[in-house]
Image (spheres, rainbow, N blue to C red):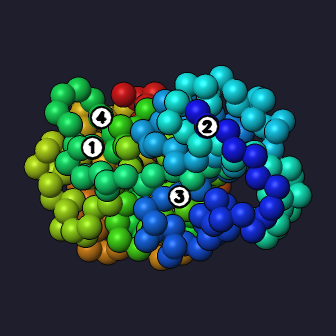
Amino acid sequence: MTIECVTDPLDARLEAYRRARDPAWRRTAGCFVVEGRLLVERLLGGSRFRARSVLATPGAVARLRPFLDAAPDLTVYVAEPAVLHTVLSFTFHRGCLALAERGPELSPATLVAPGGRRCLLVLDRVADPVNVGALVRNARAFGAAGVLCAPGTADPLAPKAVRASAGAVLALPVATLADWPEGLEALRQAGYALVALAPDGAVELRELGGPRPVPARLALLVGAEGAGLDPAARRRADLTVRIAMAPGVDSLNVAVAAAIALHHLARAD
């Protein structure tokens, strides 16, 4: 680990941090932002991504020291809070942030591994990065093997998504299913039952694990708020399930609905 003190917000060494709020720049530069001590700890402490550098206050560096010491090639820029606020152009209270390498895009095939019971979560055009982050967090919490994203889904490595995932996106495999919805057929050929979650599903979720067995391999399809699943994707589903709700309630937030479904499937497995 190399520690460099920075006192000038215009210091050239912090140029990447000044530009990191721009999504287009992050894509071109092949990086993403991790904010806050807990998430930086998770980035450094065994995530699937490599940190480029860390920018932190002296106090945050002291608390992060065990993780920083374990990263010998890492550069850590140390600055007072006022410098961080100026560099980031807003008041920043989390004490540290990091730039991490996006790395090569994962192939969907890496998530479709053979053997055992497995569940995948498939996101269809979920445009809100907060929902995407929450969905990845739910998938990890309830034992899903990974998340597949259809085109039009928000970037799982956007800052809001990383925060909402509580770092789950740093550990759980997430890939883009670019061939949509035709690519769902590859899941079926790998032995996955395609189960769509929709408010008007023909079967109640609680029937899975009861009258109906839970498939050994299952891909749970969820759609965007409002629009729901792409009709073409829904037609490819082997089964469409709904969550029973009180009269007068027509839907749930997509992350809440997926959490209920994933929890039920994990218990019924």
Q: CA distance from mark 1 to mark 2?
A: 36 Å
Q: Residue at x 78, y 64 (%)?
A: 9
71 left or right of 238? right
Mark found first going from the N terminus, 3 or 4: 3
Q: CA distance from mark 2 to mark 4?
A: 42 Å
Q: Tell us which disc is closer to us: 1 or 3.
A: 3
Q: Tell us which disc is closer to us: 2 or 4.
A: 2
Q: Is residue 21 above or below residue 222?
A: below
Nearest the viewer among 261 and 19 is: 19
Quick one: quadrant of the N terminus? Answer: top right
Say if mark 2 contacts mark 3, CB within 8 Å. no
Q: Residue at x 72, y 39 (%)?
A: 37
Residue 236 position within the rendered picture, expressed as x and y whole percent measured from the top left? 22, 64
Residue position marked by numbered label 2 in the rendering: 2
The amino acid beneath tag 3 is Phe
Nearest the viewer among 117 and 251 is: 117
Residue position marked by numbered label 1 in the rendering: 111
